[in-house]
Image (cartoon, rainbow, N blue to C red):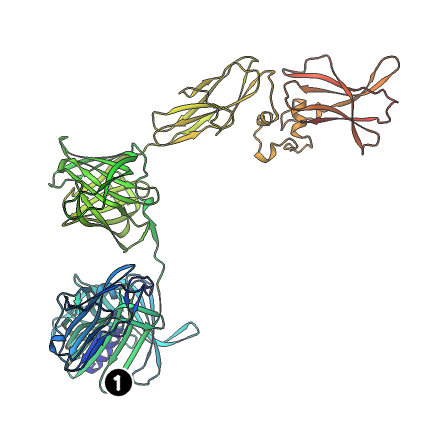
Amino acid sequence: MTPQSYARRLCAGFLLLALGATIAAAQTGTPPAVTSDPLLREVASGASLVLAPTLEGDPVTATQWFRNGVAIDGATGVTLPLASVDAADAGYYTAVFTNAAGSTTVAVAAVEVDGVPVPPDTSASSYRLMEYFYPASEGAEWLYAGLDATTHTTVHTRVTLADLDRAVTCLTGRHSPQSYQVTTTALAGAYGSYAAGVFTPTKTWTDYMGASPTGLVMWGDDYTDGESVRLDGSYAFPGTMRLGQTAERTADYYEHGAFVCPVTAFFQLLSVDTVDTPAGRFHGSLHVRIVLQAPGNLRIWDEWWVAGLGKVRNQWIAGSGLRADSRLVSTTRPVAPTYRLADYFVRPITGSVFHSTGKSWNNSDSHTVSTITGTSVPITTYTGGTFPLTPGTPVTQLVMADQNVSSATDGTVQETWAEYITTASGLVYWGLDNPTEVGSVRFENGAALPVVMAVGETVVVPSKAYLNGLYVGTGSLTVRLLGVENCTVPAGTFANCLRLEFTVAIATNSQTYEMWLAPEVGCVRYLATAGGGDRERNLVTWAVPSAPAFSSQSTLESCPLNGTAQLSVMAVGTADLSFQWYRGSAGDVSTPVGTNSHLFTTPALTAWTRYWVRATNGVGSADSATMLVMPAGGTMTLADWVLLDPLPANQRGALNTPAGDGVTNRMKFALGVAPMGAATLSLPKPVVVAGTGSNRHLGLEFTRNLGAQGISLVLDVSSDLVNWGESAATLEPLAGTPGVGLQNVRLRQNLVLGADVRRFARLKVTAP
């Protein structure tokens, strides 16, 4: 392959390198944002120029312009006119625009006079290029549409992140190449056509790149036609760049294992622009120029990259009239799983104790005991304040307290501290106390951890910080989810632990540490990586108090009439259980009756009565089921009677027939038959009863429930078994003792037979 063909081939490589991990929607908020044309402005001496950025957001209320980081006197309008420019006017222009939503510093223009390049602006913000083009999600795809430089027809390009850790063979050593293995990211590229949602490739290739400590390294590519390009590893993109800054990289190029030539690439960050594409408008796009030079060949690329998204536009130039311009059409990526952090922190149960072992800050062996001392502990935080020495206004917060004691192997206490966190609606870190070091750190409104996170995600939570009651400036809590791993510690192996990195920063002091959090257990491993504190802790044992639960209890108890019954329950749970008994159905706390014991002796009873008990400890409480006490021969209600059998709630009504025999609960209640009991032998039997003289009467004989309350027994009569009506009758006791609380009776019609044409009778049970 000639140097010229290599430069042409590497063009495709650069097309792929500017990929990102997530799509960032165009800014739609109200703070000021510049949406105008590209920032590089080339003018001649003596010409006039007006910097007039197009702004989005709420109306601007104040403006201040800067040149090379220095405020321009009197430059406070939304536009900046420059009359008769000269070399002194060259430079980088930024502005601070303020509106009701706040202030935003934006780069507006790089002004170049008479073609003299603007020197780098050392006061400008730097941009970490990897954040703009490094992909991190396998399966993510980017689709571009552009004009082919030769045929002037539309060509589509598709790029897919195929593999994050593919091994390839690379070369070094120039004229005596030596091969070696590197682990790279593989990007599958394809030229083709896109129509009706379908992409048809016509030419494919694979590019390889890897991460270095400062940026990305281009390793080469493979084409389906068998060509293989490799670079020696010195071809690393710049790590960070400022507006106008240039960087040069030279790498040795190899084809099929043979050295071909050195290739030099020049990078320059031209501006931060707004780019319109078929996929939408993207603000804050880095406009980077890449000039690739091989012996006898030159190519120029202008590329626009969006943080977290990748390349949104690519324009390249080679020779006279040979141009191409490609813009983003769409981008997709697999949906990364998210993890709810609150599910991985220890459940906020007072009395939970965690024992850990490891190395302390002085590298000595150490044991740590962490105890949750309360779930509603008041602490004092602060609001307001003026940097650096004015105390804020104390505000009491109710938080969960975590008390920690770190001791050496001989039992000597090395350090004690308490940490405070809120878990009600999410995880909010409020600060800590360290009496050994007189350290009391507070965040004004707490530092709210993200509710859910995906692997690789980083969240920075700023908050005003107070140290020992004094305001010390803006602090922050940075949370990064490094991965989901199995973690083995002395307490065992915990699966699917979140590996989180935390950085707590206050003024000039910060600490960074990693934690492995097991679901519903909490931290099983801790590793400090910067800023002091314990170096390492590994979980040995842990104990979490359990809420009460009833393991056994009675639901039906009998006692003599005017006698007492002893009720009992068996409850499990962490010690120090207390019990409160109540009369009534479970959940009704209107009538407390009992003592602090799992046993309860009822008073003397003449009526069926319900009881239940609530068990409580420091974790929570549990309610028993309803217990029914039945004194022999005592009075009762239908609602109590239906508790004799375990019936569904919708089968406890007076007219329900849960046994399926057609006999209602109310009838069985009157006859003294359990709801699920057989009623055939207990149903009323028709009789003709002798009266005075030769008179006879129609009647029914049955056994009735003496204790049944709230019902009436009525004789219903009919002449045709269709039309029924109540008839006056007399309830007469009969001989015999059917059982405790029952009575043999006869319900006799008062009218004599013959005086009433109705000859059929049935028992009717009514309720007031």
Which of 494 and 77 lies nearest the eye of the viewer?
77
Residue furthest to the bottom: 320
Kind of residue at badge 1: Leu
Residue sitting at the far front:
74
Quarter of the view holding residue 303: bottom left
Between 412 and 39, the one lying in front of the other is 39
What is the quadrant of residue 236 in the picture?
Answer: bottom left
What residue lies at 35% left-to-right and 54% top-to-bottom? 337
Residue 618 is at least partly visible in this image? yes
Q: Nearer the viewer, residue 297 or 547?
A: 547
Image spot of residue 653 (x, y percent): 62, 32
Quadrant (top left, top right, bottom left, bottom right) of the C terminus: top right
Horizontal relation, residue 478 to residue 451: left or right: left
Q: Which residue is mark 1?
A: 322
> What is the total number of numbered labels drawn onto the structure image?
1
Q: Position of residue 252 (x, y in %)?
A: 14, 74
Residue 185, above or below 482:
below
Residue at x 66% of width, y 34% of height: 660
Picture residue at 32% right of the left edge, 85% below the top: 151
